[in-house]
Image (cartoon, rainbow, N blue to C red):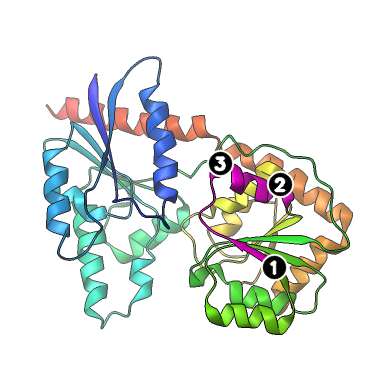
Amino acid sequence: MTGLHYFFRHPSPVYFSIEKLFGRISNEVALDGQKQFNVDVVTLPYTTKVSTMRKNISYTKRNQAFVNHITGDAHYCIIGCDNSNINVLTIHDCVLLKRYRVINPKYWIFKWFWYDLPVRKADAITVISENTKAELLKFTRCRPEKITVIPDFVDPIFTPAEYHFNGDLPRILFIGSSVNKNLDRLLDAIRDLPVRLDLICRLREEQKTKLANYGIQYTVSENLTDSELLKKYEECDLLAFPSTYEGFGLPIVEAQAVGRPVLTSRISPMKDVAGKGARLVDPYNTQSIREGIQAIIGEADYRKELIRSGFENVARFQLKDVVDQYVSLYHQLLEKRRKKE
């Protein structure tokens, strides 16, 4: 069997979506009945800081296999992988290059160590959307043929649940704490609407003040288990996901899989991920968000159509299909290496 190591960043209590994604993928590859790969998960020992990057790179070097897959975020660790091995890098987004201006030294640190050097080092790069591929080609000199788009998958625990719309006080589910999730515009959009917010995020003080001033009923929670998150989807009447930036936008397909209408942004990758199973709005326009929510809560036939289209859409994002795409890529790289030898 060929050794295959998945490298995970150091654990965080807040950011863990990459680990959930590749935890399932690595398990499925390991459980493959044909036993094609000897799979191991390697977790980096240090949270990424300038002072710990070298240590994480050295740790990667000491724990590499013949096939190494850096699963995201700590892209720089691929520098520790030998060129004689097969090295795969997954880049989920290019948000680090949007966070700082070009005149900021941090921009260049991230560009060199998270994008330019890792992209050059990798034998293959996977991205989770066409949007991320386009950004990577824009920001780096990566050859297009080096990049493979393999989407996220919807966890099999998200299955259709009975739906009884609450017409008196619809419950809107919102997920995410970062600025790009766009909670502030959502609050402005639903002001005076008879709705209740179910927030899965960490609220800033000014957001708590706005909720109070607007008189919006809400509940807030954090760090939910998978089963608790599933229950939130089952209890909601619709998902509001008017994000201004994503690598993929997993809540869209999670809500669709459960059978809930979705409101999301009319920009990539959200509109591409959602297909026809969502109300698309301008995330920078409060009135557009408001009209989208009013359309969903006000029209029963429209809700049914969104739900039906959502069920059709999630068929594109099944776990087995995504795993098969990764395994196929590994085999392509192995075959290419054999031909060279």
Magenta residue span: 219-235
Residue underneath mark 1:
218
Does the magenta segment cover residue 211? no
Residue assigned mark 3: 154
* Residue 332 in picture, x, y percent from top left: 30, 30
2 above or below 117?
above
Q: Amino acid at mark 1?
A: Tyr
Image position of 66 (left or right of 24): left
Give the foreground label among 2 and 3. 2
Q: Residues within 10 Å of mark 3 (few under 14, many from 20)?
A: many
| Of 340 and 25, the residue lying toward us | 25
Calculate the distance from the C-alpha at mark 2 to the C-alpha at mark 3: 15 Å
Between 164 and 35, which is closer to the camera in this rendering? 164
The disc, 2 or 3, on the residue closer to the chain's N-terminal end is 3
Residue 141, by quadrant, is bottom left
- Image depth: mark 1 or mark 2 in front: 1
Q: Residue at x 50, y 29 (%)?
A: 320
